C-alpha cells in the first residue's frame, strides 16, 4: 500500500515519465569562445526564467503554487552565478557546467533523511533541468489525456506541465504529503499516490490509483473498474455523504468555522461550494506583479470590491502588504537578514504613501462593512495604534467627499515572540487574532523555513510552538475575540484535531483542503481533541509529540485518515 497525498480516483493507462537528467558531453572551449558560451547560457536562463514566471503567476494559480515557483526563481539566480563561474574557470560548455555544479551541490548536502532537504534538492534539480531543456530546445511534457503518470520522482514544473493534459492520476516512488509536487497536485485537483512499488507496472497497463487510501490496482477486472467508477467513495468515511453547506460541527455539536485563503471571487466561489465561510486571509501582496510596481488605489479598490461582493456577510480579512523593500520600485536597499528587517507592517509604516493608499482602497471598498484588516508581523501595541491613526485619518479625508466610510475591523497577525508575550494587551485593542503558524514556528524557533541547512530544526510540533498557541488562545478568550489559524497547520489533517484541542474554532486554509478538514472535524469530538492536546502539551520534544499523536490518532480515529498517512513523522 502506498500513501495517498492528493485526493481523488484516477483510472487510465499507465504512461511512464522519463527520468529527468541533464545529458551532455564535455566540450572544452578556447578562451575567445567563453564569452559566447556565457551568452548562450544567459539565453537559456532568461527563457527558463520566463517559463517559471508564467508558472508562478497563472491566472488560476493559488498562493501555494505561486510561492513554490517564486522560490524556484530565487534558486535560479544563485545557481546560475555558480554555473557562470564554472564556465569561466574551467572553460567548458554550459550543459556540462550545469551538471557539474548540480552534482557537487547535491553531494555536499548528502542524502539527508530530512524531508525539507530532499524537497530543496528536487527544487534545485528542477531549476537545473529547466535551464538545460532550454539550451537543448527540448519540448515540454506531452502526455495523452486521461493517463496515469508513473515515475520514480516528479519535478514540480512537470506537475504543472502535465496538468495541461488532464491526467487521471500521478503515481510516484518518492515523495510525501508535504512535497512541493504533492502540494501542486492537491492545488490542481490531480489524484496522487506516492511511495508506490513500480516494478510490476508496464506501459499501457490499466491502473486504478486511489487518492483516498493509497491503493493501486494494476490491470483491474471489470468488477473493480465498475466499483471505483461508481461507488468509489463509500469506503472512505470522511469524504462520503455531503455535509450541510457552510456548516461544520464536531460529533458533539461544537461549531468550527472553515474559511479559505483566497485572492479572487472565482477562488472563493469554488471554496464556498466546498463549505467555506468567508475569506480568512486575503494576501494583498498577490496584487503586486513581478515587476514590483505597486497597484494603484483604484486597482486595489476594484480587487477588494470583487472579493467583498463575493463573500457577502461572511466577510473577508485583507492582510496589508506582507513584503520587503526589495519588492517596491525605488527602494533598492538590500538587507542582510530580510526576515528580521524592514518588512510587513514595518515597511508600510515607514512608507506612509504605501499604507495610506492601501487603507483608502479598503475604505472605499467597504460599502457592505464586511472587510476586515489584518496587520502582519505585529510586535506589540504600537503598530496597531499607528495603523488606527492612519485608518481614521484616511476615513476623515474620504468623508469630506461624501458620507463617512465604514471602519473595518482590525486584526493582529500573531507570529513573532513579542506578540505572543503581549497577546493580552494586544487582544484588548483589536477585534480578532490571526495565528500565522508558518512564521510563528520560524520566529519562535529562530529557524529560516527556507534554509535547508537548518531544516531539521523547523519543528511545527516543538513544545514551545504548542504552548505559544495555547497562550494566544487564552488571551483571545479573555478579551472575547476570535482566533483564526492560518498557515500549513490549519489545512493539514494531521494538525487540525490538535489545533481544535488547543481551543482554535476558526481555520483558514487553501480551497483544496476544505472538504477533508470538514470531514475530519465531523468525525471527532471536542472532548477527545482536548485530551489529545493536553497529552501533547506534556511532550518534551517534537519527535515525542509526533509519535504520540500518530499513535493516538490511529487508536481513536483509524477510519478518519487514509491508510499509510500516519506511518511517517509529520513534525
Image (tube, helix red, strand yellow):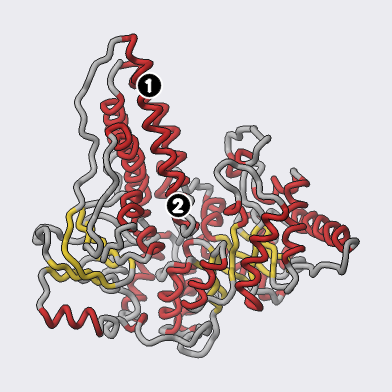
Location of residue 24 (image quadrant) = top left
Residue drawn 34% across the image and 9% down it: 32
Residue drawn 33% across the image and 58% down it: 163
Picture layout, residue 21 above or below residue 254: above
Residue for badge 1: 38
Query: Is residue 172 or residue 61 the one in the foreground?
Result: 61
Q: Position of residue 462 (x, y in %)?
A: 47, 59
Q: Can residue 112 be seen in this view?
A: yes
Q: Position of residue 166 (x, y in %)?
A: 30, 62
Q: Position of residue 143 (x, y in %)?
A: 24, 55
Seen from this angle, which residue lies furthest right? 400
Query: Is residue 387 or residue 139 the one in the foreground?
Result: 139
Residue for badge 2: 458
Seen from this angle, which residue lies furthest bottom? 252
Q: Is residue 448 left or right of residue 30?
A: right
Mark 2 vs mark 1, foreground winner is 1
Location of residue 25 (image quadrant) = top left
Count of numbered tags: 2
Query: Is residue 161 or residue 227 the one in the foreground?
Result: 161
Amino acid at each position: 500500500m502506498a500513501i495517498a497525498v492528493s485526493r481523488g480516483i484516477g483510472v487510465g493507462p499507465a504512461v511512464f515519465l522519463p527520468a529527468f537528467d541533464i545529458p551532455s558531453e564535455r566540450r572544452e572551449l578556447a578562451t575567445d569562445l567563453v564569452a559566447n558560451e556565457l551568452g548562450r547560457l544567459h539565453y537559456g536562463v532568461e527563457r527558463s526564467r520566463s517559463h517559471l514566471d508564467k508558472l508562478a503567476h497563472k491566472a488560476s494559480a493559488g498562493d501555494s503554487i505561486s510561492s513554490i515557483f517564486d522560490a524556484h526563481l530565487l534558486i535560479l539566480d544563485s545557481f546560475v552565478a555558480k554555473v557562470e563561474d564554472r564556465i569561466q574557470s574551467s572553460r567548458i560548455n554550459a550543459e556540462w557546467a550545469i551538471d557539474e555544479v548540480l552534482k557537487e551541490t547535491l553531494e555536499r548536502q548528502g542524502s539527508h533523511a530530512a524531508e525539507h532537504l530532499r524537497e530543496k534538492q528536487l527544487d534545485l534539480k528542477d531549476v537545473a533541468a529547466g535551464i538545460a531543456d532550454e539550451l537543448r530546445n527540448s519540448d515540454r511534457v506531452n502526455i495523452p489525456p486521461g493517463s496515469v503518470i508513473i515515475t520514480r520522482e516528479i519535478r514540480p514544473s512537470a506537475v504543472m506541465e502535465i496538468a495541461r493534459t488532464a491526467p487521471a492520476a500521478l503515481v510516484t516512488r518518492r515523495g510525501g504529503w508535504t512535497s512541493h509536487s504533492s502540494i501542486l497536485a492537491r492545488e490542481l485537483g490531480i489524484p496522487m499516490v506516492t511511495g508506490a512499488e513500480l516494478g510490476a507496472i508496464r506501459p499501457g497497463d490499466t491502473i486504478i490509483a486511489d487518492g483516498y487510501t493509497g491503493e493501486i490496482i494494476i490491470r483491474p477486472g471489470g468488477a473493480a473498474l465498475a466499483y471505483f467508477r461508481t461507488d468509489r467513495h463509500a469506503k472512505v468515511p470522511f469524504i462520503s455523504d455531503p455535509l450541510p453547506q457552510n456548516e461544520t460541527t464536531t460529533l458533539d455539536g461544537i461549531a468550527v468555522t472553515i474559511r479559505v485563503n483566497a485572492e479572487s471571487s472565482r477562488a472563493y466561489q469554488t471554496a464556498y461550494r466546498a463549505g467555506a465561510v468567508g475569506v480568512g486571509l486575503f494576501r494583498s501582496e498577490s496584487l503586486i506583479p513581478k515587476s514590483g510596481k505597486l497597484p494603484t488605489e483604484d486597482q486595489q479598490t476594484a480587487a477588494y470590491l470583487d472579493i467583498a461582493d463575493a463573500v457577502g456577510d461572511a466577510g473577508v480579512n485583507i492582510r496589508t502588504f506582507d513584503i520587503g523593500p526589495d519588492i517596491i520600485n525605488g527602494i533598492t536597499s538590500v538587507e542582510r537578514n530580510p526576515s528580521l528587517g524592514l518588512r510587513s507592517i514595518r515597511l508600510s509604516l515607514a512608507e506612509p504613501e504605501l499604507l495610506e493608499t492601501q487603507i483608502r482602497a479598503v475604505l472605499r471598498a467597504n460599502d457592505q462593512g464586511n472587510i476586515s484588516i489584518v496587520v502582519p508581523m505585529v510586535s506589540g501595541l504600537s503598530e496597531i495604534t499607528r495603523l488606527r491613526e492612519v485608518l481614521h485619518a484616511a476615513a476623515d479625508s474620504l468623508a469630506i467627499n461624501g458620507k463617512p466610510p465604514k471602519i473595518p475591523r482590525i486584526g493582529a497577525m500573531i507570529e513573532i515572540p513579542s506578540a505572543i508575550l503581549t497577546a493580552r494587551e494586544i487582544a484588548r485593542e483589536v477585534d480578532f487574532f490571526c495565528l500565522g503558524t508558518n512564521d510563528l514556528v520560524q520566529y519562535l524557533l529562530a529557524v529560516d523555513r527556507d534554509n535547508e541547512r537548518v531544516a531539521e530544526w523547523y519543528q511545527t510540533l516543538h513544545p514551545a510552538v504548542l504552548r505559544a498557541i495555547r497562550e494566544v488562545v487564552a488571551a483571545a478568550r479573555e478579551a472575547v475575540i476570535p482566533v483564526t489559524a492560518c498557515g500549513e497547520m490549519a489545512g493539514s489533517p494531521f494538525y487540525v484535531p490538535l489545533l481544535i484541542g488547543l481551543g482554535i474554532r476558526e481555520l483558514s486554509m487553501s480551497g483544496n483542503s476544505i472538504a477533508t478538514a470538514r470531514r475530519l472535524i465531523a468525525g471527532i469530538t471536542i472532548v477527545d481533541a482536548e485530551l489529545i492536546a493536553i497529552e501533547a502539551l506534556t511532550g518534551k520534544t517534537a519527535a515525542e509529540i509526533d509519535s504520540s499523536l500518530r499513535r493516538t490518532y490511529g487508536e481513536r480515529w483509524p477510519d478518519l485518515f487514509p491508510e499509510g498517512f500516519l506511518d511517517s513523522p509529520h513534525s
